[in-house]
Amino acid sequence: MKTIHKEYMVDKTKIGFIRFIFEGHEGVAIATTLDSKKGHIRLSIAPDRLESAQMIVEDLKKDFMFNEV
């Protein structure tokens, strides 16, 4: 099974919160910080959980910056 990788620029003060949210949804995605100063993260998403991951991202976008790069 291939993992899907998507990178985002997010509000750097929310990185811990984002990691917590994805850890709480076990098996959906793993959030990795690429550059904490810029708010650059990568989500490693299980292919069969892509839709769930996208729903979480869309919900988080309502509250703060969460832009795909």
Image (cartoon, rainbow, N blue to C red):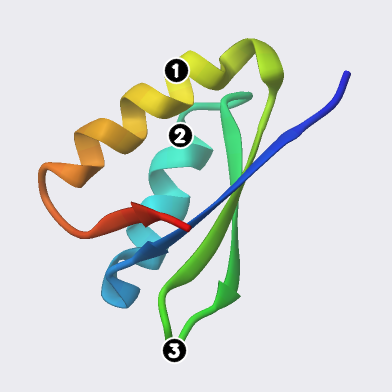
Residue projecting furthest to the right: 1
- Cα separation, mark 2 vs mark 3, equals 24 Å
| Residue at (65% x, 10% y) in the render | 48
Give amino acid for label 1: Ser
Where does label 2 land, which residue?
24
Asked if the residues shown at circle 2 and circle 3 are in contact, with their CB atoms under 8 angstroms apart, the answer is no
The image shows residue 14 at horizontal and vertical percentages of 29, 65
Give amino acid for label 3: Lys
- Cα separation, mark 3 vs mark 1, equals 28 Å
Q: Earlier in the sequence, mark 3 or mark 1?
A: 3
Q: Nearer the viewer, mark 1 or mark 2?
A: 1
- Answer few, some or many: residues within 10 Å of disc 2's Cα (few below 14, many 20 plus, some between 14 and 19): few
Residue projecting furthest to the left: 63
Tag 1 secondary structure: helix
Indicate whether 30 appears above or below 46.
below
Q: Quadrant of the N terminus?
A: top right
Residue 52 is marked as 1
Q: Earlier in the sequence, mark 1 or mark 2?
A: 2
Q: Nearer the viewer, mark 2 or mark 3?
A: 3
Indicate whether 46 appears above or below 48.
below
Q: Earlier in the sequence, mark 2 or mark 3?
A: 2
Residue 59 placement, left or right of 42: left
The image shows residue 31 at horizontal and vertical percentages of 57, 51
Where does label 3 land, which residue?
37
Give amino acid for label 2: Gly
**Residue 24 lies in quadrant:** top left
| Residue at (26% x, 33% y) in the render | 58
Asked if the residues shown at circle 1 and circle 2 are in contact, with their CB atoms under 8 angstroms apart, the answer is no
